[in-house]
Structures are given as C-alpha cells and as structure tokens.
Image (tube, rainbow, N blue to C red):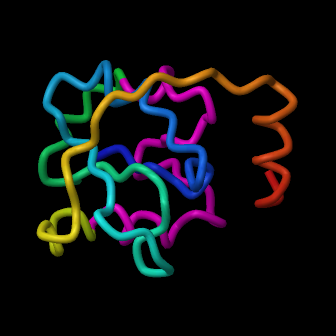
Amino acid sequence: MAFVVTQLCKDCVDSACVAVCPVDCFYEPKEKNDETPNMLYISPEECIDCAVCEPECPWEAIYPEEDVPEVFEGDIELNELCDSKREAFDLAEVHDHTPPSAEEVAANKAKYGL
C-alpha cells in the first residue's frame, strides 16, 4: 500500500512532505489543469510506505491508501497518474513555505465536508 495525497493539497502545495521523503516519490504536474490539479502527487510505484510524510503535511492531506476518506477515493487514481503519465510530471522540489493556521486547515477540510 502506498500513501495518497488528497485534494486537500489542491492549490496549497506545501512541500514539507517532500523534504522528509527518503525516496523522492513526490511529483508535481508540469501543466495544472482539470486532469492534473495544482497539488502534489505520490507515485504508488515508488512509495515505500514509510509514513514519514503523513505527519509532516500541514494541510493533513496525506493518507494511507486504505484510509483515504470516501470523498477523496478518486484521488487514489489521481496519484497513479504520475506513474502512468510520467512525462506530464516533474519531481517535486522543496519550496519555502509558511505553515497554515489551524483555522485555514479547518476551512480547507470544511470545503470537502470533513
């Protein structure tokens, strides 16, 4: 099982998870569009299921595949795109970021009914 970045990351794209990943399995789409939204993706083929990224995500957007909330089940296939359409993705880089406030995280989750 791999970990999955959900759309809670959409347009937030905090790279704290990228910084701790021991195998560099995070990707960003070269073009942001409806098929590949502006978010990070985890390659299920490269993820070693180490769980280091999950607690580092300040947006609480990363889940073990078996624990992905129902509202985000489509995100499992979305993450698989970085393996099946590798040419459309670049390896994610660590960027400077300001962690969100608890209120921002709660508001982001509320958009999806969480």
Q: Which of 58 and 14 is in front in this view?
A: 14
In the image, residue 77 lies in the stretch drawn in magenta: yes
Q: To which quarter of the image does residue 90 belong? A: bottom left
Left-right relation of 88 to 15: left
Left-right relation of 113 to 57: right
**Range of magenta residues:** 53-80
Residue sitting at x 35%, y 70%: 31
Q: To which quarter of the image does residue 84 belong? A: bottom left
Q: Is residue 45 above or below residue 88?
A: above
Residue sitting at x 48%, y 21%: 56
Left-right relation of 90 to 79: left
Residue sitting at x 66%, y 66%: 71
**Magenta stretch mostly in which secondary structure?**
helix
Q: In this view, does 59 lie above or below 76?
A: above
Q: Where is residue 10 in the image (x, y as percent from the top left)?
A: 57, 55
Q: Where is residue 34 in the image (x, y as percent from the top left)?
A: 50, 80
Left-right relation of 113 to 35: right
Residue sitting at x 25%, y 34%: 49
Q: Position of residue 27 (x, y in %)?
A: 27, 50
Q: Is residue 105 above or below residue 50?
A: below
In the image, residue 43 lies in the stretch drawn in magenta: no
Q: Nearer the viewer, residue 62 or 96?
A: 96
Q: Which of 38 and 5 is in front in this view?
A: 38
Q: Where is residue 2 in the image (x, y as percent from the top left)?
A: 28, 46
**Looking at the image, how many numbered discs can be counted on the residues?**
0
Q: To which quarter of the image does residue 78 belong? A: bottom left
